[in-house]
Amino acid sequence: MTEGGAERAAELAANLARVEERIARACGASGRSRDDVTLIVVTKTFPAEDVRLLAGLGVRHVAENRDQDAAPKAAACADLPLQWHFVGQLQTNKAGSVSGYAHHVHSVDRLRLVGALGRAARQAGREVGALVQVGLDAGAGASGGRGGAAPQQVAELAEAVAAQEGLRLEGLMTVAPLEGPYAGRPQEAFSRLAEMSRCLRARHPAATMVSAGMSADLEQAVAAGATHLRVGSAVLGVRPRLR
């Protein structure tokens, strides 16, 4: 490893340790086991070399939000024991590419995307885990400002995912909204998602994932019952500007 690589590895290790400490404290404060919460490191805009360093530090779940970055990075790291999560808003014409490498897609928010992902997964001979993204600021029939289907649409989308060969319904995801009744109230937003998850599990017991919380609000997400945290900048640092 080069000197620069060793410095970067040390930086990532220190950042990762701080994030792990935050998660452990939040779990302790909420009476939860640390084992109940999965850390997903969001590596968007950072190079494949950082993914390799993270894998060497024990990270097993990584996420991307743009297919044009994710596809080559996943290919470059195909030899690593990683689970790839796609967490960004997804165009249907990218479903074929994403289904080729993603183990989990967190951003399913419309029926047309359910069909496109299912077809692509079947063609690739894979089964892809799918989460319905909930836009807690979305009105009926509209999308949330940060993506996601309106809460009234979640049940229909979940049934569609569950019925789609090639997809596996895994749970729900949300991003703390910047507008609407939950703006500035992330823990209440995440608690609402957890409540919706309980309702979903009554019909689909295996759909246990509650994907919520990022670098700034992971403690609130843990307190509300999140099972998966999507943390980027707290581990990797300030992001390079998108091209």
Image: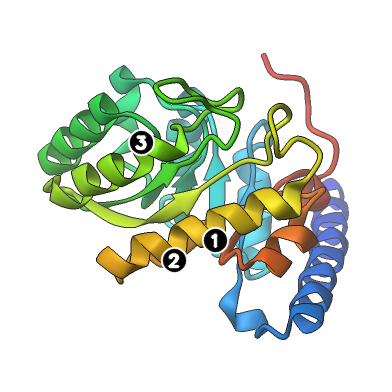
Contact flag, marks 2 and 1 (Cβ < 8 Å): yes
Rendered image: mark on residue 214: none
Q: Is residue 136 left or right of residue 242?
A: left
Q: Residue at x 76, y 59 (%)?
A: 220
Q: Is residue 132 left or right of residue 146?
A: left
Return the x and y of residue 39 as percentages of the image width and height.
63, 63
The N terminus: image quadrant:
bottom right
Q: Which residue is mark 2?
A: 198
Q: Which residue is mark 3?
A: 153
Q: Residue at x 53, y 34 (%)?
A: 135
* Residue 14 is at least partly visible in this image: yes
**Which corner quadrant of the image does residue 60 belong to?**
bottom right
Q: Residues within 10 Å of mark 1 (few under 14, many from 20)?
A: many
Q: Which residue is mark 1?
A: 194
Q: Earlier in the sequence, mark 3 or mark 1?
A: 3
Q: Secondary structure at mark 3?
A: helix
| Amino acid type assigned to the residue bearing label 2 in the image | Arg
Q: Secondary structure at mark 1?
A: helix
Contact flag, marks 3 and 2 (Cβ < 8 Å): no
| Amino acid type assigned to the residue bearing label 1 in the image | Ala
Return the x and y of residue 87 as percentages of the image width and height.
51, 40
| Amino acid type assigned to the residue bearing label 3 in the image | Gln
